[in-house]
Image (tube, helix red, strand yellow):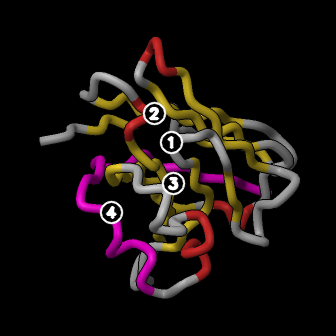
């Protein structure tokens, strides 16, 4: 069973930055695809960014150029650097993981409404609040 623990959520001003961390109980983050999702009350999980086992990434259009997903295998941690924050970035942010399969086209699935269902492992989330 993979356990994921998010941290780094906080309150920030519009235009500011935050870095979220997701520490995974795995031997190597390169064996997994990791994604960051966000959710606001009454809405489904929205895929924000994904990184596969080879290090390739994909982003939702709403965060391209502002957010960066990365990973540190030595620390078994995945990060989400969030710059130029906007009030609409306010949400609970979740880290999720699935075993890496190069044939699965996980990166391209970011835009599919069923993207969240591909991930069996989830953290409990960390709250990000951006004020104008």
Q: Mark 2 touching mark 1, by CB under 8 A? A: yes
Quarter of the figure with residue 48: bottom right
Q: Which residue is mark 1?
A: 53
Residue 39 point in image, percent of width and height:
46, 69
Q: Give SS at disc 4.
A: loop
Give the distance between the C-alpha atoms of the residues marked 4 and 2, in whole angstroms.
Answer: 15 Å
For the record, the magenta segment spans: 114-132
Residue 60 point in image, percent of width and height:
70, 68
Q: Which residue is mark 3?
A: 36
Q: Earlier in the sequence, mark 3 or mark 4?
A: 3
Residue located at (33% from left, 54% from top): 98
Query: Residue 30 — which label?
Result: 2
Tell me if 92 is positioned left or right of 64 in this view: left
Residue located at (49% from left, 56% from top): 102
Quarter of the figure with residue 80: top right
User: Is 113 in the magenta?
Assistant: no
Q: Which residue is mark 4?
A: 119
Q: Mark 2 touching mark 3, by CB under 8 A? A: no
Q: Residue at the far top: name it.
A: 74
Q: Earlier in the sequence, mark 3 or mark 1?
A: 3
């Amino acid at each position: 069973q993979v356990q994921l623990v998010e941290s780094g959520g906080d309150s920030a001003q519009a235009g500011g930055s935050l870095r979220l961390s997701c520490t995974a109980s795995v031997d190597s983050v390169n064996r997994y695809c990791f994604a960051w999702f966000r959710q606001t009350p009454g809405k489904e999980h929205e895929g924000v960014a994904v990184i596969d086992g080879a290090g390739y990434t994909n982003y939702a259009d709403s965060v391209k150029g502002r957010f960066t997903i990365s990973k540190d295998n030595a620390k078994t941690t995945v990060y989400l650097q969030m710059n130029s924050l906007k009030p609409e970035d306010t949400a609970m942010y979740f880290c999720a993981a699935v075993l890496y399969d190069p044939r699965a086209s996980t990166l391209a699935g970011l835009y599919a409404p069923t993207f969240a269902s591909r991930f069996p492992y989830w953290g409990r989330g960390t709250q990000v609040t951006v004020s104008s």
